[in-house]
Image: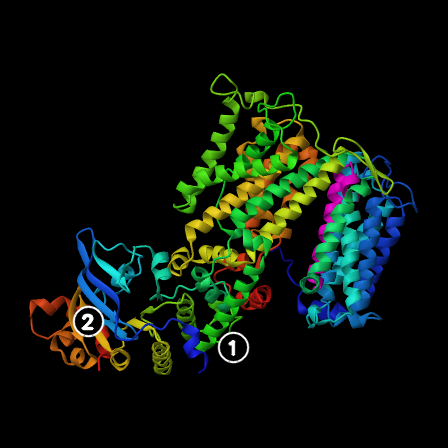
Amino acid sequence: MITIPNIPESVVARHGSKAWPMGLAGAALLVIGSLLSWSIDPQVLGNLSISLNPGGLQIMVIAQGLIAVILLLADKGPLASLDQFADTALGLRALATWTLIFMTMVVVAITVEAGGLVNVEPGAWICFLGAVLLFASSRLVLPTETRHLSEASLPGWVEILIICVIMAALLFGTAYALGLDDAWQFVFFLVFVMGLVITATRAGALSWLGSITTRRRRVLILAAFTVTFLFPLTQGGSDANMSIAAQVLVFAAAAMGLNIVVGLAGLLDLGYIAFLGAGAYVGAALSTSGFATIGWKPPFIVVVLVAGCFSGTLGLIIGSPTLRVNGDYLAIVTLGFGEIFRLTMFNLDGNNGPNLTHGPNGIPAIPDLEFGSFNFGDTHVLFGVPLARFSNYYFLLLLLIAFIILVFYRLNTSRIGRGWVAIREDEKAAEAMGVNVFGLKILAFVVGAFLAGMAGAIKAHVDVSVTPDQYIFLESAFLLAAIVLGGMGTIVGVLIGAVILKLLPEKLRFFADYRLLLFGLLLVLMMRFRPEGLIASRRRQLEFHEEDEELALRVEGDIAEVVT
Amino acid sequence: MTVTAEAVGARPTAGVPLLQAEGVIMRFGGLVAVNNVNMTVNGGEIVGLIGPNGAGKTTFFNCLTGMYKPTEGHVRLSGVELPPKPRAVVKAGMARTFQNIRLFANMTALENVMVGRYCRTSSGAFTSIVRGPKFKREEVETRERAQELLEFVGLGTSTEHLARNMPYGNQRRLEIARALATEPKLVLLDEPTAGMNPLETRQASDLIFKIQDSGLAVVVIEHDMRFIFNLCDRVLCLVRGETLVEGTPDEVQSDPRVIEAYIGTGTNDEEDDEEGTTGAQDAEDTP
């Protein structure tokens, strides 16, 4: 992507020997500067004005400095045994670049927020100088030939420990990030994390991590679910972030459902939100709300299934005539269906046809769920931490997502999944080889709709009310964007995409006006530089890079590994 | 080879009519691409289909396999009328390969063949999600069968290669393995040796004999005359959508009309004029 031109060899030859001490000096300056005051104004970016009492941003820079020291020592020094496996030089370059970006942003932010460059204290300037030195030194360090990190064999317990540490870091990192009320600090934390991830990628740690995770998939899945399960406990009883988290999970559940349609079967569905809405309306109409329009009050588990079946039937009705035609037509028809659904819900108010939805007013006052004596509206105490309403729904939604992931994964790795890949590859050939193309497309459509319906029924209770304007086209577009951004056909990617698209607007309210602009820009950039998404499905990556023979040879092993 | 017989399965009795195409006509608007062609293929037989470029050979194949719905005529397999739906045709026991290879490029060799097993397996969505005993049994069977078939066509060592990374000759073999995976009684091969060198061509004809040995009938479209006359029990020559000659390789080979159709007579006989130019590039293949 963006590459900084290499320094001429003559310069490297002349000054190469200075790289190492210069880098160490830079790292030392980063640490020392972070212990000093950065800003005169204590109100800016958390409190960075007290020496020897580092604030959040300063701790991040200390961490960057320490990682730089480790990388330098691995490049040439006591930790040199690491160097044979890791690309320390490339890692150092990435780290130095991101540290410099970070410190530049710090200076800019303090200047803007506190009103003038004069507010920047020496500590920040020392750090900035350190970042510059580190950057200069990193350009002089030459990359060495290294063995692939995945060849490094560690004892099993170390690998499991590493997974646990990463998961714990993820848990506390998320909790910390959600706890940041200041948008600037949140942005800085994102930049910090991005820097670390890119450093790790460049140093080769990510490919190594990839090889661990395929070997230890069970441990990883278990750890991931433990972490997500423990997340509400880090909130100390506050429900503010949990309400965001519950919204994120509803969104993620819907995105995973759509991922079956878009990512696996390769069908473009622009009206998917209607299936979520259909489920929500069923959930609301069959609830015990005083405004519910249907007299039947079955237990919730039945409601969820009815909602799923209702959405699935809608999917069947929409799909059967349209799935016989090509992708573009399907996109238009589903787009139309999404609007028809919204307008129908808008108009079923008793004036035109039966009163099922109360029209634009929707169905409000949907009571909380109650399983036996467990009321979802009450606060329950778990391990001494009070868990309020949204935490309860969070757990329920977690269960739903686990179910959706199970359906997704198992369908993908079965005869049906193979059929879907074949259809994506060459529909005519698939048909000629006996694959039931139409049937498989319908299946994807109906399963996707069914899962969305289930999610919708729960969403109705989380949101308390269901109105037509919650299910507009923009929501469908966002679901699709989450899939494209995260990586079509992947589980982790789409979850990450959903979290990014739902969480960022909540935390970065100051750019709410530019939200669509920025997402549009983000998607355009993704399409240009990484069309397969943040986390690429190997097969999708190949489909996007038909000409790239080298890539095809490289990922061949990965695909075969999954198959056998 | 021990897998030969079992690998391909069904073993129809030799000599009994297997495929019967009667009066197949395919019109595209005013153009008659296939005009009243009759073809019978008996069990265990290799039939060649030759003809100059544009003679309608591939169109005829498409009519047989349900990719096109013939304007008129009947196609019967083992006496049962075939509907013009590719999937039903495969299910009935007729599989094909394509002139321009149409593999699933981003799937491994093994997966490609496993897709071929789709129509002979039946695990649905529910079984796949629950992973019941039926699912597991079918998955294991599918995998083993695919592996056997890859060994049968000589690709036993490249099961894990992506189709797009395989050499051209192997892609052709893989396409045949994928067709065999559908448990056909009859395989239609559309130019299986196009672009191959003499060694690869010989290997291809060995493979086709091997398929015949396992009890299947084969129909081959080819331009390589030495290959066709060496391989086939019977040869059908199509010219401009019509059957010109049908007979044993010797009969067809010595028929002056066939030679005319390919290289023209050199005189200004109006029948052969146009074909003489279109068929010129095939002339070098003629022995």
Q: Nearer the viewer, residue B162 or A143?
A: B162
Q: Is residue A173 above or below residue B269?
A: above
Label 2: few (<14), some or many (≥20) within 10 Å? many
Work out whether residue A242 can be spotted: no
Q: Which quadrant, please, contains the C terminus of chain A?
A: bottom right
Amino acid type at circle 1 is Thr
- Foreground residue among A58 and B84: B84
Q: How crowded is the residue under tag 1: few (<14 C-alpha within 10 Å), some, or many (20+)?
A: few
Residue A513: percent from the left, percent from the top?
63, 31
**Count of numbered tags:** 2
Magenta-highlighted residues: A176-205
Residue receiving disc 1: B157
The answer for which chain carries disc 1 is: B
Instruction: Tell me the residue at 23%/67% (across/down).
Output: B53
Residue A251 horizontal side relative to residue A192, left or right:
left
Q: In the image, are marks 2 and 1 on the same chain?
A: yes
The image shows residue B11, relative to residue B240, as above or below, that is: below
Mark 2 is on which residue type?
Cys
**Rendered image quadrant of residue B74:** bottom left
* Residue B225: % across, % down: 25, 78
Q: Which mark is residue B237?
A: 2
> In percent of the image, x 79 and y 39: which residue is there?
A179
- Callout 2: SS: strand
Q: Is residue A426 left or right of residue A394?
A: left
Sequence order check, earlier mark of 2 and 1: 1
Asked whether residue A197 is drawn in magenta, I would say: yes
Please tell me the numbered disc located at residue B223.
none
Up the image or down, A294 lies above or below A508; here it is above
Asked whether residue A150 is drawn in magenta, I would say no
